Structures are given as C-alpha cells and as structure tokens.
Amino acid sequence: MLRSELAQNARKKALEKFSIEQQTSNYIDIYHQILQAKTFEYYP
C-alpha cells in the first residue's frame, strides 16, 4: 500500500517536472524565433 503510493507520487513529480521542462523549452524556442525575427527586421 505505502510503497505503491510512494511510486505514484514519484511518477507524478517526474511528470510535473517533465511538463515544466517541456513548457520552458517551448518558451525558449519562441523567444529565439522572436529574436531572429527582430534581427532580420533590423538587418535584412
């Protein structure tokens, strides 16, 4: 009982960490795209 609860909690934490990392990398990708777009605006 207790061991399976611990395993579920660990899995939940890992999934949360993974989704946060996914979101962060998505934001970084968007940020880089914006930077590139702005760079091309000023230096065609």
Image (tube, helix red, strand yellow):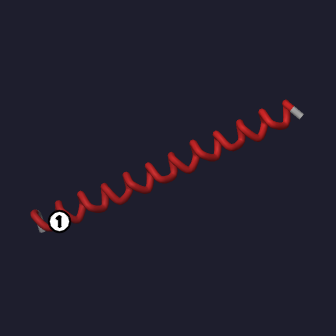
Q: Is residue 29 above or below residue 8?
A: below
Q: Residue furthest right?
A: 1
Describe residue 23's horizontal placement relative to residue 17 as left or right.
left
On the image, the x and y values in percent for residue 34 come to 26, 61
On the image, the x and y values in percent for residue 39 come to 17, 60
Residue visible at 31% across and 61% down?
A: 33
Of 44 and 11, nearer the camera is 11
Residue 42 placement: quadrant: bottom left
Q: Quadrant of the N terminus?
A: top right
On the image, the x and y values in percent for residue 10 come to 71, 36
Describe residue 18's horizontal placement relative to residue 28 as left or right.
right
Kind of residue at disc 1? Phe
- Disc 1 secondary structure class: helix
Of 4 and 39, nearer the camera is 4
Q: Is residue 25 above or below residue 7?
A: below
On the image, the x and y values in percent for residue 19 come to 56, 50
Residue visible at 85% across and 31% down?
A: 3
Residue visible at 77% across and 41% down?
A: 8
User: Would you call the spot at circle 1 few (<14 residues within 10 Å), some (14-19), or many (20 or more)?
Assistant: few
Of 2 and 24, nearer the camera is 2
Residue visible at 58% across and 46% down?
A: 18
Describe residue 38's horizontal placement relative to residue 27 as left or right.
left
Q: Which residue is mark 1?
A: 40
Residue 30 placement: quadrant: bottom left
Q: Quadrant of the C terminus?
A: bottom left
